[in-house]
Amino acid sequence: MTLMPADASVLTIEYKANFVSPATGKRMIARGRVTKPGRTITVCAGDVFALSGGKEKLVATMLATMMVVRERPDLPA
């Protein structure tokens, strides 16, 4: 949402998640990023890591495609 216009919402077009190993550890760390920003369509990716003994282990990864949705003033609420 940080790259979307202030008056916009988003609609998820596609979402793919891969769970690659058990999430064992004291903490989880999630890191997300915008892979390809666009005016209408934006592609995002993210990874989740389990933190144990000071080491990070990848437990999940995802890819999502989002679409900007703006309100149309010509339509009734």
Image (tube, rainbow, N blue to C red):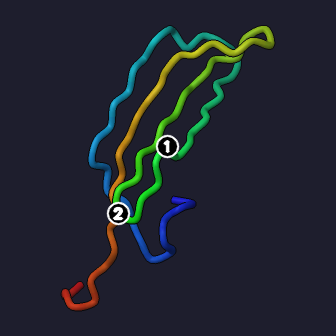
* Mark 1 Cα-neighbour bin, 10 Å: few <14, some 14–19, many ≥20: some
Q: Give the x, y percent position of residue 6.
A: 51, 74
**Circle 1 residue:** 35
* Mark 2 Cα-neighbour bin, 10 Å: few <14, some 14–19, many ≥20: few
Element type at mark 2: loop
Most extreme residue toward the right, as rendered?
54
Q: Residue at x 43, y 30 (%)?
A: 62
Q: Is residue 51 above or below residue 3?
A: above
Q: Is residue 55 left or right of residue 24?
A: right
Q: Quadrant of residue 9?
A: bottom left
Measured Cα–Cα span from mark 2 to mark 1: 14 Å
Q: Residue at x 72, y 11 (%)?
A: 52
Q: Residue at x 63, y 17 (%)?
A: 50
CB under 8 Å between discs 2 and 1? no
Q: Give the x, y percent position of residue 67.
A: 33, 58
Disc 1 marks a residue whose amino acid type is Thr
Q: Is residue 58 left or right of residue 13?
A: right
Q: Residue at x 33, y 31 (%)?
A: 16
Element type at mark 1: strand
Most extreme residue toward the left, as rendered?
75
Q: Quadrant of residue 58?
A: top right
